[in-house]
C-alpha cells in the first residue's frame, strides 16, 4: 500500500522477497538516515568486508542467527540482538549454516544527533480518532 501526505510516506517492502534487501531511502524520501531491511539465506555471507567514511551503523536482528566479524572479533548474533558499529570498523556478516538471518540496518552520520526524543518531541492538543 503506497500512500503519502504532505509530511509522510508509506510503502511496502517487496524487494525483500525477490532481492533479499529492501533499501528505504528512495521509497520513503529519507533525509537523515539510510535504512535497509535485509535477509541472508542460511550459510550466505555479505560478499565483501566494508567500513564507512562517516556513517555509523546499527543492526537489529529480527529473525534467525548468524555471525558478525568486526575489526577481527567474531561473535554470534540472534533474534533480538542490537549491534552498533563505528564508521571505521571493518565488518562482515554471515547467516548461520542452518538459519537465515533477517535484520534491519540503520546508517546515520556519526556524532550528528543534536536532540533526543525528550528534547525534540512536541506534545500536541490534537487527537487521533481512537482517543475519542
Image (cartoon, rainbow, N blue to C red):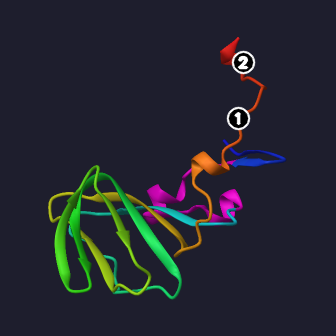
Front-most of 115 and 72?
Answer: 115
Quadrant containing the N terminus in the rendered view: top right
Q: Quadrant of residue 109?
A: bottom right
* Magenta highlight on residue 115: no
**x then y, percent, for residue 23:** 56, 65
Query: In this image, 51 relative to 14: left or right?
Result: left
Identify the residue at the far top of this view. 132
**x then y, percent, for residue 42:** 23, 63
- Neighbour class for label 2 at 10 Å: few (<14), some, many (≥20)? few
Q: Quadrant of residue 102?
A: bottom left
Query: In this image, 58 relative to 6: left or right?
Result: left
- Which residue is at 53% across, 83% downward? 54
Secondary structure type for disc 2: helix
In whole angstroms, how far apart are the C-alphas of marks 2 and 1?
17 Å
Residue underneath mark 2: 129
- Which residue is at 20% across, 57% downward? 99
Write down the region rendered in magenta: 10-29
Q: Nearer the viewer, mark 2 or mark 1?
A: 1
- Neighbour class for label 1 at 10 Å: few (<14), some, many (≥20)? few
- Which residue is at 67% across, 62% downward? 30
Mark on residue 123? 1
Amino acid at each position: 500500500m503506497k500512500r503519502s501526505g504532505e509530511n509522510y510516506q508509506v510503502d511496502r517492502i517487496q524487494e525483500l522477497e525477490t532481492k533479499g534487501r529492501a533499501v528505504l531511502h528512495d521509497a520513503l524520501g529519507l533525509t537523515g538516515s539510510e535504512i535497509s531491511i535485509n535477509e541472508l539465506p542460511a550459510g550466505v555471507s555479505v560478499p565483501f568486508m566494508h567500513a564507512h567514511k562517516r556513517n555509523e551503523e546499527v543492526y537489529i536482528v529480527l529473525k534467525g542467527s548468524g555471525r558478525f566479524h568486526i575489526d577481527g572479533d567474531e561473535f554470534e548474533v540472534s533474534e533480538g540482538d542490537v549491534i552498533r558499529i563505528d564508521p571505521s570498523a571493518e565488518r562482515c556478516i554471515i547467516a548461520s549454516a542452518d538459519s537465515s538471518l533477517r535484520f534491519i540496518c540503520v546508517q546515520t552520520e556519526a556524532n550528528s544527533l543534536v536532540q533526543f526524543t525528550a528534547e525534540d518531541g512536541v506534545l500536541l492538543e490534537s487527537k487521533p480518532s481512537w482517543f475519542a
